[in-house]
Image (cartoon, helix red, strand yellow):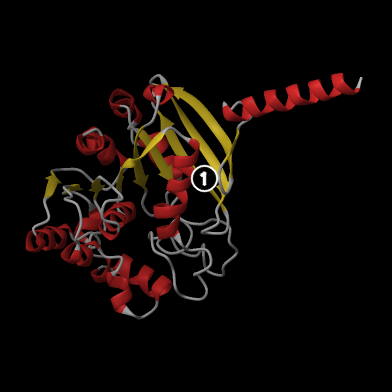
Amino acid sequence: MIGCFSYRTTLCVAIISLMVLRGLTGVIRATMATLTEVSSNKMFGGWQKVFSHESSEVKCTMKFGIYLPPQAEGGKIPVLYWLSGLTCTEQNFVTKAGAQKVAAELGIILVAPDTSPRGCNIEGEDESYDFGSGAGFYVDATQEKWKTNYRMYSYITKELPALINSNFPVLSDKQGVTGHSMGGHGALICALKNPGLYKSVSAFAPITNPVNCPWGQKAFSGYLGDNKEAWQEYDACCLVKKYNGPPLEILVDQGKSDNFLTQNQLLPDNLTQACAESKMPIVMRMQEGYDHSYFFIASFIDDHIRHHARFLKA
């Protein structure tokens, strides 16, 4: 009886372990955290999934969307990170951008995280759309009130890639980053602050020069304090001037009918000028009639993913 019991117990453990490895339980064991599957939908021969996990960087539950194209079943493939804008969650890109079809064609994994910590019970975190919840600005806050949770820069550049690399068939040396508005700012600074970490970068209507626009000034003063030299460490126009790393080719699309363009929140000309002065290659496409919405993003997302594929599949 003892031998029979031991055999059955071992077999049961082996079966459960196999189920976990195959994702059948909805839970994936990561190196430092547990990923819990929130949703899974088949799409273009692959799988659009959403996972949650407890973050060590931002000290709360975070979610991210991940599209696994059919090629992911056959081995490791490149990954492209999407960073969303103000008020967004992981769902905006997942449901509105229409990126999965071309990702399935090209064999690129797409990862779309949330834009800030959530439910941290910090006074004022839910008072405005452009600061606090949904508005992490991809910085590591230094101000006492925010510095424990609002560490989105480290979350995006360190913790999240480590989780993705540990749990999915990703070529860790073949990753790119893109994003929209606040997330376009995030994509640019993540690439410029980490030479060689990302093979490719692009952005839709990015906040290119936050030290000189109302959104950026509000966020940076709140998260980083009054030291404007610290602000420059998260400003693409400042960072591009001191970039010293592998060649980057920046692609930016900007709608000419974007109301935030006329409000001087985005300042694309400043980025173009900074790149020219620094001899950083940039393609700045001003798109007639397009606004700031996901209709604009969906119109040009294929171009951006193909741009990334040039470098990620080289």
| Location of the C terminus (image quadrant) | top left
In this image, 167 relative to 269: left or right?
right
Q: Residue furthest front?
A: 3
In this image, 237 relative to 85: left or right?
left
How far across and down, in percent of the image, does residue 209 sit? 23, 64
Q: Secondary structure at mark 1?
A: strand
For the question of whether residue 135 can be seen, the reply is no
How far across and down, in percent of the image, does residue 257 sit? 19, 49
Q: Residue furthest right?
A: 1
Q: Circle 1 is placed at which residue position?
A: 63
Along the line of sight, the residue nearer the viewer: 8 or 163: 8
In this image, 310 relative to 191: left or right?
left
For the question of whether residue 162 can be seen, the reply is yes
The amino acid on which the numbered mark 1 sits, given as a three-letter code, is Lys
| Location of the N terminus (image quadrant) | top right
- Indicate the quadrant where residue 99 lies: top left
Residue at figure coordinates x 20%, y 43% from the top left: 290
Along the line of sight, the residue nearer the viewer: 27 or 264: 27
- Indicate the quadrant where residue 4 lies: top right
